[in-house]
Image (cartoon, coloured by chain):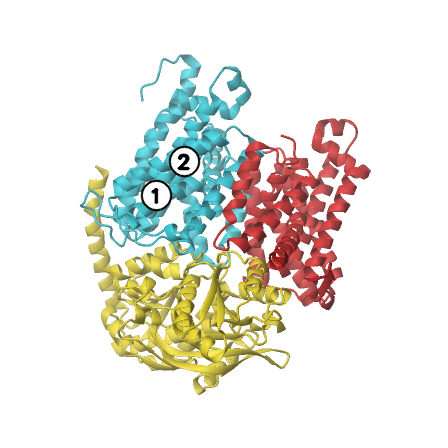
Chain colours: A cyan, B red, C yellow
Amino acid sequence: MAAPERTGAAETFLRRRDDARLTEAGFWVLALAVPLVLPEHAAFGTQVLIMMLFALSLDFILGYAGVLTLGHAAYFGVGAYVSGLLSAKLGWHEPLSGLAAAGVVSAAFGALSGWLLLRYRDLTLLMLTLAVSTTLFELANTWSSLTGGYDGLMGIQIAPIFGVFEWDIAGVTGYGYALALLLLCFLALRRFTVSPFGQALRGIRENPLRMRAIGAPMLGHLTLAYTIAAGVAGLAGGLFAQTNAFITMDVLSFERSAAVLTVLILGGTGRLYGALFGALVYMLAADRLAKLSPVYWEFGVGLLLVVIVLLCPDGLLGLYDRVRAAFGWRSR
Amino acid sequence: MGHAVQAAVSILFDGIAYSMVLFVMAVGLSVTMGLMGVINLAHGAFAMAGGYLTVTFLGDLGLPFLPGLVLATLAVGAASVPIERALYVRIYRRPHLDQVLLTIGVTLMSIAVATYAYGPSPLSIKLPAFLETQVGLFGRDFPGYRVFIIAVGLLAFLGLWGGFERTMLGAKIRAAVDNRAMAEATGVNTTRLFTLTFALGSALAALGGALAVDLVGLTPRFAFQYLVLVLVVVSIGGFGTIMGTFAAALIIGVIDNAGRYLFPEGSAFFIYLIVILVLICRPGGLFGRA
Amino acid sequence: MRIGSTSWIAPLALLAIAAGTTVASRAEADTVKVGVILPFSGMAADVAQSELRAMKLYYKLHKAELGGHDIALIERDSKEPSGATAQTLTRELVVQDKVDMLVGYQFSPDAIASAPFITQAKKLAILVNAQSSHIPMLSPYIVRVSASSWQITYPMGPYAFDKLGCKTAIVGFTDFAPGRDVAAAFKAGYEKAGGKLVDSIAMGGPAQVPDFTPYLQRIKDEKPNCVYIFTPAASFNAALARAWRDQKVAEAGVRFLGTGDVTQDSVLPQLGDAAIGWITGGHYTADLDNPANKKFLAAWTKEYGDKVKPDFFTVQGWDAMAAVFHVVKTLKGKIDADKAVAALKAWKEDSPRGPIMIDAATRDIIQNIYVQEVVKKGDSLGIKVIGTIPAVKDPCKELGVGNCAAKK
């Protein structure tokens, strides 16, 4: 991570915030260990990884650029349908190119919608993002001859990865595939956030007036960030379609957008790892609560949201930081 | 051609009835969002509460229709006061993300409570005989219940509009919507105002939910299903405006109804496209301030 | 390379699973594990509950027949009707819980999404509901004990034309797979008999109960003799009845016909007097007069009271358990999927819905379809059976049309 010339207190601050730490490796090693230690949970693990990727994409636009969107599932859904339709309708079964296509199309869509929408702020922007994803949802419904509508898109068959790794029922292949993608996207997003572009995004989030005053190209920066976020969300959606070999319209639903928002606030916004931990905790909690009491797991999630917003709005990792600060532990 | 006119009249009438329900459900949200700037996604839950309480009052307690309806409305309004004091005050000044998530959390909890208390099956209410008859107007027969809904909606609109424009309370609310700090400087107790407005908005939501029960049925998922529609109405109409909500509800209700008649396979996305168009041209909604 | 390091874990892990499964199954040879995948939360929760209760009641009453064996149910909530959760649960039940067979799949997408994994896992899957006609074609291990939408609807076409005087008709349906299946089935059967289908109206999606008014208005405007309607669940049926009453469609001279779903017994009282005279075609009603049904109703009332009537969903659960019992008894507790399917292909049962059997060619159910009329019974509503169409095989697969057309 080559950093430009920095001096003194500014350098220390940035280094403390941005440089990679050894402890991070712990997370990735654990993630790798899952299929070895708990192979029968690999399929579930894959879904967790997909949620992590999706949440990462949202963190980039929400946590770093400060854009609140109620419709991020739109890009997840676009990616899912692109991958799915390529296989089901056009007979293109190669996974990596199918995934790349998903990312490219959703990024393009993100660029277009971002350019249109990001001129507006607050409640207007919120409603616009919701309207975009709901429009797509209803379009998928109307166009059910293509998308399968409520019944879902059938006939998705994915060829073995690199022609070698078959898709097993335990889901271990899918897990490895998802983990590799997650790591790549994480590294890329990490690179963006520590760059001057990432700094500009933070500036836009913290003080838009000031940013405008110093001549920063607001719409340009925001649109670029939104495009990247949409692209990564599309990759997550494509992954979802490929590992499940079946998708329905709920890839575009409001519930999905709300879930990923929940994940992010659970883990903590603006710090990438918040998305990862939030996704892990959320998926585990949802899974456990659903098995405990199939009918009432919703209450648990609702309560969790209220408690988090009221007591620890910077999420689990924020809580962790506060605990460490309270004990006087510094990171470096 | 008389037959096409007949059909058009029916579509218009049913659309307006649907619009009135939307209006009553949405107007509370418009006012509170305009006044307090808080995104209250739990508004649908208050509507649902109104529906379920009506079912209990009319069904289990055997109350007659109108008193049951009024009681349910008042009960939800009253119950919203401690909720506002305990939860909502804490998020008025918080970022929108926090408001969105807290209120989604409240909605999820209310859905779970409704499922626990009433079960997941759909419930219905028994309308009184005088509403199940047909009403003759302009030489045609119209279903009595829908006429009743339109009457209630119009009354609510006139009452609110008059209240806003003519009463001291209305003036205070309008002042606080325009400029809270200034209103406070002139001695308006905005905290009490917020609570009162919130209670009023929730009560109206409950009324809308109660009216909707016989129209579309009631299940615990009601809270989310009608939330999106209500948000659409409020954003097209503009926040903090009664006239705006009324106009938007009319537009959405009639278009949605007509769409389902003319293009049953799918016309819902049209409404959301309208939202995008309206908001891009007039970001504050049709009647709101940009 | 991470992918490289994962790849040799996969066969090793699978080997471990296989070894573990053999060990486990030898140790628990006497208890057959059955994974139950039903939507215990969400819109169909009460239906799922009813099906599960029927399964448990059958088990309780017939336990002694199992000899030295036992059946353990592992219940999982498939939540939303999109099929995503059902698919994940299928994999988990097979891989983690090591079940011997799977029972459930309420919604068609649940079964459709899970079919490839059912085949891959080589486990018998008994469909408790999932009515899209082509589903048993998706995997050689799927057996259906419920009904198919074509089976229920296709025979009503000729019946409507010949016996009910429907020279012209409209079909209305909730817009998703079973609904479109019904529309296609009615059109095929009705037009073959000589009827004229004037229109086919999609009445909103299954996620939300619509206001039926505009659809009924359109029906009134087009003035058919009859309308044949499919709506999937209780909330829809009640809203439909309300709108039917409000719009005075019967007074406009249109006769109501529908699938058995519309008049399911548990919801019938809620429809109100507007439903009197409605005629539906279905595979079960609680008012059926046969000895097996009388016994079933007596047992049900004794165990669960008489507040909620059993309906066709309940009986589907009951018969699903009967099928499980047949497999366990025939294979003496050693469940092999191919042998289990063979056992069910030879299965015949006197069900509360009449005589049923599994079609050896298609693994779908063969049963009677009853033409039912809604009548006033005391204070409430009941069903009078006015006709029986015996031993109906699924026409979609028989004719090889639409989704049921044989693939290359």
| Amino acid bearing label 1 | Val
Q: Residue C224 at x, y = what percent?
A: 53, 68
The residue tagged with tag 1: helix, strand or loop?
helix
Decide which of A195, A212 is in the foreground and name it: A212
Q: Quadrant of the N terminus of chain A?
A: top left
Residue displayed at 65% across by 49% down = B25
Considering every residue shown, the one lying at the far front of the view is B1
Q: Which residue in the structure is indicated by mark 2?
A: A109
The reply, left or right, for residue A236 in relation to residue A94 is right
State which tag comes first along the sequence, 1 or 2.
Answer: 1
Q: Residue C396 at x, y = what percent?
A: 34, 69
- Label 2 crowding class (10 Å Cα cut-off): few <14, some 14-19, many 20+? many
The reply, left or right, for residue A49 in relation to residue B173 is left
Q: Which residue in the structure is indicated by mark 1?
A: A82
Q: Residue C376 at x, y = what percent?
A: 60, 79
- Chain that bears disc 2: A
User: Taking the image as drawn, is residue A80 in sight?
Assistant: yes
User: Taking the image as drawn, is residue C147 in sight?
Assistant: no
Decide which of B44, B83 is in the foreground and name it: B44
As drawn, the label of residue C80 is: none
- Label 1 crowding class (10 Å Cα cut-off): few <14, some 14-19, many 20+? many
Residue displayed at 33% across by 34% down = A185
User: How far apart are the two marked residues, 1 and 2, measured between alpha carbons?
Assistant: 12 Å
- Chain that bears disc 1: A
| Amino acid bearing label 2 | Phe
Decide which of A201, C214 is in the foreground and name it: C214
* Discs 1 and 2 share one subunit: yes
Q: Are marks 1 and 2 in contact (CB under 8 Å)?
A: no
